[in-house]
Amino acid sequence: MRILLSNDDGVHSPGLVALYEGLKGMGDLEVVAPDRDHSGASNALTLNRPLTVEQHPGGFRSVDGTPTDCVHLAVNGLFREPFDRVVSGINTHANLGDDIIYSGTVAAATEGRHLGLPAIAVSLVSEGRNHFDTAARVVRMLLESTRPFVLGPRSILNVNVPDLPWEELAGFRVTRLGDRERAEGAVPMTCPRGKERYWIGAAGKGGDAGPGTDFHAVSQGYVSLTPVHIDMTRHDSLVSLRSWADSLQTSMGDGA
């Protein structure tokens, strides 16, 4: 098995190192990750300049681009032998609910899926204890399962692991994405030259965080497993939207 590892926290992230160490012996591991932190990069591709790849000790490679750049380049240019799957992480913070819209960790996994590979995004819901070894063990368990689960086309598995020792995990829960409350306001500051600058405010707390959600599972000590479908079409609105569009078409015909 050939596994591509990437992330959005950068090639030197302790989560990425823990993932690599935790998956040793499972097959051929290749690491291609951003040269710096690209949290919040979402699915951005770098199209306005060429990308530079640097080699690091241990065989890790870095790219001066986004997480999506890393996976795209690794699958489509850096290596002759194809990969069997992509694992992105271990992110140093949660990717719960609508975090996944912004997440570079999830984006790296979705890029793998776009390129035809099964993909997992894994995050540690960090509380400062940094049990990356627990998250790495979770990933290994998923990959070594004797009953491999196929999500189907255009889908990835989003995994969130509580920041706990392995023996304190409550188990696994299959979940849906919850939803965060509105983010906090931007934080103003003044730079040394007297110009006003702003930090993006902190993410909101879980608004839709009841039973069945990823928020709830993690809060109860469970590993959250969420199937994420990349088709963003709101299918249950298609019929009503067609009816509305038909009325517009009629109005055009009436010369209104």
Image: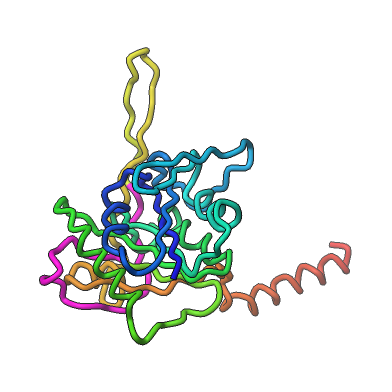
Looking at the image, the residue that sits furthest to the top is: 193
Residue 28, horizontal then vertical, whole percent:
41, 63
Specify the segment rendered in magenta.
160-183
200 or 243, which lies in front?
200
Instruction: Decide whether residue 179 is among the magenta residues.
Output: yes
Q: In this view, does 69 lie to the left or right of 206?
A: right
Q: Which quadrant: the N terminus?
A: bottom left
What is the quadrant of residue 148 in the picture?
bottom left
- Number of marks in the image? 0
Q: Nearer the viewer, residue 132 or 104?
A: 132
The residue positioned 87% from the left and 68% from the top of the image is: 254
Depicted 192 relative to depicted 98: above or below: above
User: Residue 236, how many percent across, how many down?
Assistant: 56, 78
Residue at 61% of width from left, 38% of height from top? 50
Q: In the displayed structure, would residue 104 be above or below residue 207?
A: above
Identify the residue at the far bottom of this view. Answer: 147
